[in-house]
Amino acid sequence: MNYLDQKKGFLGFDANHKSVSQVVVVPFGLEKTVSYGSGCKNGPKEIIKASHQVELFDEELNKEPYKEIGIQTLKPFKIKSKLNDALNQLSKINEKILSEKKFPLVLGGEHSITPGSIKPFIKKHKELILLHFDAHADLRESYQGEKFSHASAIKRCLDFKNLKVVSFGVRNLSKTEMDFYNKNRDRIEIFWARDKKKWDLEKLNNLFKDKLVYITFDVDGFDASIMPATGTPEPGGLYWDEVLRIIKRVCQISNIVGADINELAPIKKFDSYNFLVAKLAYKILSYSFEFKR
């Protein structure tokens, strides 16, 4: 695998800093099935660029987590032109990273990356929990004739029978998606955005304790007031502190094995949205390794 120089990679830290790498950041700007706003193919580049402005010291953890974690970033590469080929390409990349006992963090790109990203984890582990942040359920069997659409990402993940899903922030879905959810509530738990003031996060113990967890974070899970830079923004969403509280708690009681962040569609001259996603990525890594069990 070919890696960027550390100064050019995620967080842009000093190339003189040497640590054993435990994380590989995979820029994968796949954009094939977007149905409203476009531009997520530029997400990885802008996240990495913004990450150079993220403070490396974490005041909550009272340390510079990157020094303990060790992070490398893959050099940008050509993504296969056909959707299925691209997803298989991503699966092979993550399979290689896992074979080296490292943690993949995939930066999309649209949400259709997740079934490809998660496939080697499904093969490796007997059971896996998908922690899913999103405005949408993404449980459609297909959308606009494409079964691997961004609107079908979680449905495709559930094609793997050893997977369960816990979703946070959902506030938009079709009737067919609701019907599918109601028939599969043994495998799908949804914390509806409309109920967030009543969420009982003690429930997380039953759902995640001692489990292996993969995180997929569609940035439209955030409220549109703080994250308009996405293809399908939705009002009534999650805020920064609410998201961190959930991620931190899950990291404390489970083992996070990998993650992807997707659907950032950068807006020119509005870098704060890119920065938010870059900081989210660093927080996910920091919590995952701080509480690694």
Image (cartoon, helix red, strand yellow):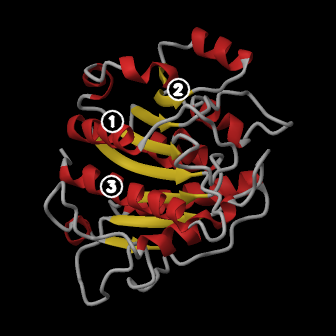
From the image, state whether disc 2 or disc 1 is nearer to you.
1
Report the side of 181 relative to 279 (left or right): right
Q: Residues within 10 Å of mark 1 (few under 14, many from 20)?
A: some
Q: Residues within 10 Å of mark 2 (few under 14, many from 20)?
A: few
At mark 1, the secondary structure is: helix
Q: Label 1 near label 3: C-beta < 8 Å?
A: no
Report the side of 13 relative to 47 (left or right): left
Q: What's under tag 3, amino acid-wise?
A: Lys
Mark earlier in primary sequence (2, 1): 2
Q: Residue furthest left?
A: 62
From the image, state whether disc 2 or disc 3 is nearer to you.
3
At mark 2, the secondary structure is: loop
- Image position, residue 63 (x, y; %): 15, 65
Up-down: is 28 above or below 225? below
Residue at mark 1: 246
Up-down: is 67 above or below 293? below
Residue at mark 2: 161
Quadrant location of the C terminus? top left
Residue at mark 3: 283
Q: CA distance from mark 3 to mark 1?
A: 12 Å
Mark earlier in primary sequence (3, 1): 1
